[in-house]
Amino acid sequence: MAGFLLRRLLNYLVLVLVATTIGYFVASLSLDPRSNYAGRNPAPPAAVVDQQLSDIGVNDKDPLLERYGHWVSGVVQGDFGRTIDNRPVTGELGTRALVSLRLLVVGSIIGAVVGITAGVVSAVRQYRLSDRLITVFSFVMIATPVFFTAVLLKYGALSLNNAAGSTVLFYTGFETPNLTGSFATIAWDRVAHLILPTLSIALGQIAYFSRYQRNAMLDVLGSDYLRTAQAKGLTRGAALRRHGLRTALIPMATLLAYSFGTMAVGATFTEKIFGWHGMGEWLIDSITRNDVNVVATVTMFTAVFILISGFLADVFYVLLDPRVRM
């Protein structure tokens, strides 16, 4: 088992290097940091522009491989370079990553747990009222764009707050600025700001996972080994818990892990609408500003995040499928 996981980890490390390299090259070739100096009055001297771009490692007149080598050598030492306005990328990366992870971890866990449970219930009670209600909800949420769901939730919060005459649900930001008080007060403030954006992410995840889990569970319900287990004396519920559910979860392991990984910058609409300054918002803003180092850093962060997610999927496979341990 350890050998299998080690081989997988090495493969993922190679993929992270490849993804980061491609991301840096694409950002360097497609973005134009020099355009940020165009149209200024008075126009800065060309030599000054070249020097400033060289100082942050994005001068298009320097060889691309040289710029890449300089950036990678800094990354190895924990330095991700500087932004287009000459601020350290590393400091902002930590802040942005924590904001996104706070949102994505909670939303993904709720979405996965509720979605898988709904999928199992829907399969076991196929064509009954509960199955039809879950199916209708899933199709409606899958067909609804994420940004529209977020806008509806924000509108609902505004209407509720206006009706109550006070702030019942927070709909912007991830904390109340300059809030002071006890640990419990600050913790509750963070949780209250987390409710709506988390719900925006979780609703789509619930719909998405429930459909996959329902189909996986239906395949298991018709299997010979499940009927054999029941013929040997196990009740239907016990056979499903001991054999059916475990087998049905195997194909979900990769889906859960990689969907969590790709959401690192996939929650851009949610972050923008609810005023969460996370990785997705940072990526969009950086592309607008032609900020090569930030785009490359976000690409690497996403690749590492997917690496971790993929490795967790392999661990789940090992735990769920004994054949992988051989």
Image: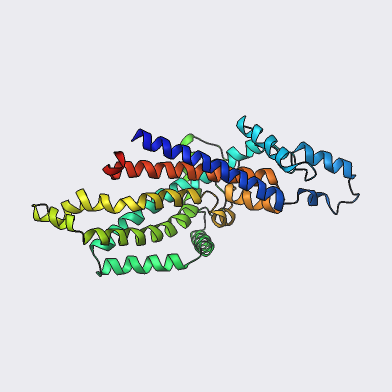
Q: Is residue 225 left or right of residue 325?
A: left
From the top left corner, tell me how far across and down residue 113 is, in percent.
Answer: 35, 51
Residue lying at 43% horizontally and 65% vertically, measured from the top left:
141
Instruction: Name which residue lies at 11% across and 52% down.
Output: 234
Which of the pair 49/281 is nearer the observer?
A: 49
Q: Is residue 205 visible?
A: yes
The percent position of residue 12, horizontal first and vertical second, equals 48, 41
Q: Is residue 7 left or right of residue 237?
A: right
| Spot occupied by residue 318 in the image (x, y as percentages of width and height) | 32, 41
Residue in the picture at 51% in, 49% down: 193
Q: Residue at x 38, y 65 (%)?
A: 138
254 or 265, which is in the foreground? 254
In the displayed structure, would residue 149 be above or below residue 35? below
Q: Quadrant of the C terminus?
A: top left
Instruction: Say which quarter of the image contains residue 212.
Output: bottom left
Count numbered badges in the picture: 0
Determine if residue 175 is in view: no
Residues 198 and 246: in front is 246
